[in-house]
Amino acid sequence: MSDVSSSELRALMARVPSVDKVMASAEFAPLVSEYGRTQVLNALRDALDAWRISAQSGDAAGDAAGSPAVSALDTAQLHTTVAAALLARNASRLRSVFNLTGTVLHTNLGRALLPDESVRAVMTALTQPANLEFDLATGKRGDRDDLIDDLICELTGAEAATIVNNNAAAVLLTLSALAAKKEVVVSRGELVEIGGAFRIPDIMSRAGAKLREVGTTNRTHLKDYEQAITAHTALLMKVHASNYAISGFTKEVGIDEIAPLAHTHGLALAVDLGSGTLVDLGEWGLPREPTVRETVAAGADLVTFSGDKLLGGPQAGLIVGRRELIAKIKKHPLKRALRVGKLTLAALEPVLQLYRAPEKLTERLTTLRLLTRPAEDIHGAAQRVLPALQQAIDARYTVTAEPMFSQIGSGALPVDVLPSYGLVVRMADGKRGGRHLLALEKQLREMARPVIGRIADDALRLDLRCLEAADEAQLVAQLIAQANRH
Ligand SMILES: *Cc1c(COP(=O)(O)O)cnc(C)c1O
């Protein structure tokens, strides 16, 4: 590529239409009307700057015959460039994906999916004023917790409840309000780290509480708790191990034993349950998790749990327990900082209401419907999607429908437990996939609606448990469109 002489460059520049002229052109009018003048002007200046830089470096100097390519830089070409830039810039960064990872409550993919009732309630809350903190009976100021604390108490058997941004916030607030400058007794087997940066010892020190570790990693006895109690003790605490399991020679002290010990010493027992199941999952053949009601009934004075794990609602942290303790928690300044917004409350209330009809839950509560979806049903989906996937990808790959196991995710039993079905992609020549599988994984991830699977055992695996009817149709359409492109 030849260098452009300065006179040539000046000639090229002179032919570029003026910013004012382009902005006033008929081509640009729809852009200005959609994106506003400021954005269009900025994008246009960027496009012109980019052109100047490439012109100066010779890129725009044209072909070997010397005819300058820059004649193409007219208003129409600028429109194409600017429109594409504005579209890309204004596209939502938070995008829908297909969760074919096999993990139903996938933290990185947004955890629980909410039912239509929540969608409608959020829509209303978004567009209409509401009695968020307004008591309609008296016309006086209200408390946002009052909107759903009765419902939470009804479903858990607790005396009182409050709600914050997530369960990490619930634990931080509980410890800050009840144990600052005092000691909290926790078993060494329960000092867990739960994804990201939630570690019990760190939260404890952030809350200004002193951790008093007792027992060993695998075994803790009641006398360990008893011997740790001093005049400085504020709370005894139990933490659900969530994402790991201790097996073998183990001993954990149950809530029904620790609670009386705490109460004899005038202390409270706080339990961080994590997942916060409201119903016995064993009824549907799922692994049993202690429910919030059982935990309260066993003697816990406070229980903290997430709204968007097994409960199946929006991101939230719920704290339930004894009235005077909840009252103290609500008065702490951190409660104001960690409170939930109206959208969370709007989304959560209909989810909690679904629990009033437990026999309908597997139909209406999305999370439970996905967790209990029969393997045959998923097998059907796999057979229907298979041909479209095979056509959409290179013939070097071969797709089969195979049984596999899904995971619950979000700290419920960290093992594969749910018999499922999915599509498995291997190399057609039987060789190891290596970078070819990585390339395919990337190709699927870069689709209009990204398809997220996982590579394991030298195959790309797409678990179809979370692909319900409407999504299945959309995925097939997307794959067929891709197939038609080549
Ligand atoms: C998941 C979990 C948390 C954190 O809850 P978030 O809602 O993600 O903030 C805390 N404790 C336990 C035991 C958990 O399982």
Image (cartoon, helix red, strand yellow):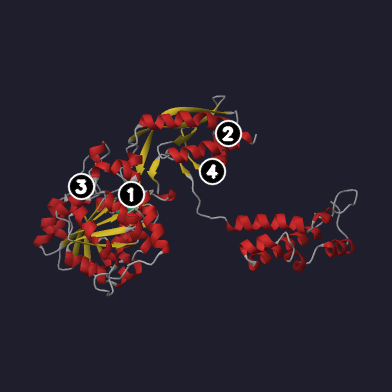
Bin the neighbour count of mark 2 within 10 Å (Cα to Cα): few under 14, some 14-19, many 20 and up: many
Asked whether, in this view, residue 80 is left or right of residue 381, the answer is right
The x, y position of residue 243, in whole percent, is: 32, 47
Residue on which the image places disc 2: 392
Residue on which the image places disc 3: 219
Residue on which the image places disc 1: 312
Is 445 situated above or below 30?
Answer: above
Which residue corresponds to the image point at 22% horizontal and 52% vertical from the top-left?
Answer: 292
Q: Secondary structure at mark 1?
A: loop
Tell me the tag on residue 445.
4
The x, y position of residue 39, in whole percent, is: 64, 65
Which residue corresponds to the image point at 19% horizontal and 47% vertical from the top-left?
Answer: 252
Residue type beneath disc 2: Ala
Inter-mark Cα distance, 3 to 1:
33 Å
Residue type beneath disc 4: Arg
- From where the camera sits, is residue 444 visible? yes
Task: Classify mark 3 as within 8 Å of ligand 1 or not, answering yes or no.
Answer: no
The x, y position of residue 121, in whole percent, is: 37, 57
Foreground disc of the pair 2, 4? 2
Bin the neighbour count of mark 3 within 10 Å (Cα to Cα): few under 14, some 14-19, many 20 and up: some
Q: Earlier in the sequence, mark 4 or mark 1?
A: 1
Inter-mark Cα distance, 4 to 1:
26 Å
Choose between 108 and 478: the one closer to the eye. Answer: 478
Residue type beneath disc 3: Arg
Q: Earlier in the sequence, mark 3 or mark 1?
A: 3
